[in-house]
Amino acid sequence: MEKIVVKGGYKLNGEVNISSAKNSVLPIIAASILCGDRCTIDNAPMLEDVFVICDVLKSIGADISIDKEHSKININTGTIISQAEPSSELVRKMRASFLIMGPMLSRFGRVKLSLPGGCNIGSRPIDLHLKGLNALGAKIDLGHGYVEAISKKLIGNKIYLDFPSVGATENIMMAAVLAEGETIIENSAEEPEIEDLADFLNGIGAKIEGAGTGTIKIKGVKDLNGTLHRPIYDRIEAGTYMVAAAITGSKIKINGIDEEHLKPIVAKLTECGVLMEIEGNSVWVDGRNEIKPLDIKTMPYPGFPTDMQPQMMGLLCIAEGTSLITETVFENRFMHISEMKRMGANIKIDGRSAVIEGVKRLTGSEVKATDLRAGAAMILCGLSAEGITEISDIYHVDRGYVQIEEKLRKLGAEIKRVY
Ligand code: EPZ
């Protein structure tokens, strides 16, 4: 099984370039189903999850070519077979595949697909997705392991989300594009990736206002066409490299950031003593000061992102004092704690919170990546630990980080992938 092996204690220097956002590109590829035309995604991240959702669209007849050399994806969804059922093996492989439900229902009036699996960080229910589609007039049939939605014509409606779910906001927004009349989504998720998806949808001819706020208005349209789209940068990848600078006591430059999207991450890193200077789409990160302890509570955007929680926990393992992290978004996103304790971290779980007593230094060990962001966090811990850290189950990390070991090696880390 592939592993990443890190020899800790090396300072980082130089510059790293951030790729575009996985959590933008996945819903955008799903949304391309709506237009039945040719779309091109420029500067797309060449990631396992992106390849999987392309395979899901291919399984229903889309014509897709991925130009890995130029990070470009060309999609023609005019060839999709309307009554096709996406491959259940692929849909179960990646939860985000469920985002094809809204577009398929909106364009073809029927969709049947396997229920998305849960994963290590939580049960990941879809009740808010289905409640929204039902409010637009879809008849929902929940079978054993699959869900079917049928509707001759979706009709716009006002929908209040009990929780600002990113996926539910995206699925409902996409379904409403070809619905009759206006849809208003209240208490919608405000993540930057939602805004990027709305930009793509408006690019193919949708009429969406308010994306990125808590109220999104979608006026149904009849005709759509293809478009070219360049996604936003990946704020979580950028945040991960900011923590890499902090945990190794280094100063590096990160190219490919959006200051607005990084606000919660910059705020908390500043609070623990990291110095940052933003220059346009780049940021200098100076982590050479002592890391001060702090309290973090993950929240929907613009709160502190849950996708940065494991990385920050790794950093706080070596802070000068006691820190508290409360995970409010997912019910089981502390799997990385037992792995960090194998490296000498002093962490106690108390319900949805973890108390971290900083230690002088972590010690290299054999650890596992328990999910995508946890795996990235273990690599960060390895960068700072005494000795060698071997991280197995590294496939989790490849789902969301483009060439992570190459990018870190270019910064001066002693890191390699072994097969
Ligand atoms: C998206 O997942 C991201 N994935 C996740 O990133 C991210 O952690 C999450 O949003 C929160 O920001 C993609 O965009 C592909 P949610 P999503 O629906 O849409 C509950 C990563 O590491 N919920 O906002 O699945 C759910 O159980 C991944 O890149 C319901 O109860 O997240 C969870 O507790 C991990 N019912 C909370 O909402 C529903 O119908 C947040 O889920 C839907 C969600």
Image: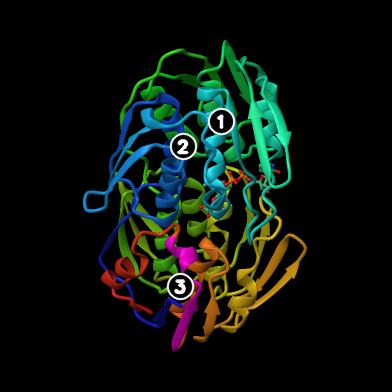
Residue farthest to the right? 351
CA gap, disc 3 and disc 2: 31 Å
User: What is the number of the mark on residue 30?
Assistant: 2
**1 and 3 marks in contact (CB < 8 Å):** no
CA gap, disc 1 and disc 2: 9 Å
**Residue 15: which quarter of the image?**
bottom left
User: What is the number of the mark on residue 293?
Assistant: none
Identify residue for label 3: 379
User: In the figure, is residue 350 to the left or right of 258?
Assistant: right
Along the line of sight, the residue nearer the viewer: 411 or 120: 120
The residue depicted at 37 percent of the width and 43 percent of the height is 258
The residue depicted at 61 percent of the width and 17 percent of the height is 152
Q: Is residue 260 visible?
A: no
Tell me where the magenta segment starts and ends, as one range. 387-398
User: In the figure, is residue 307 to the left or right of 15?
Assistant: right
The image shows residue 50, relative to residue 391, as above or below, that is above
Q: Give the mark, 3 or 2, whose residue is nearer the N terminus.
A: 2
Three-letter amino acid code at disc 2?
A: Ala
User: In the figure, is residue 288 to the left or right of 329?
Assistant: left
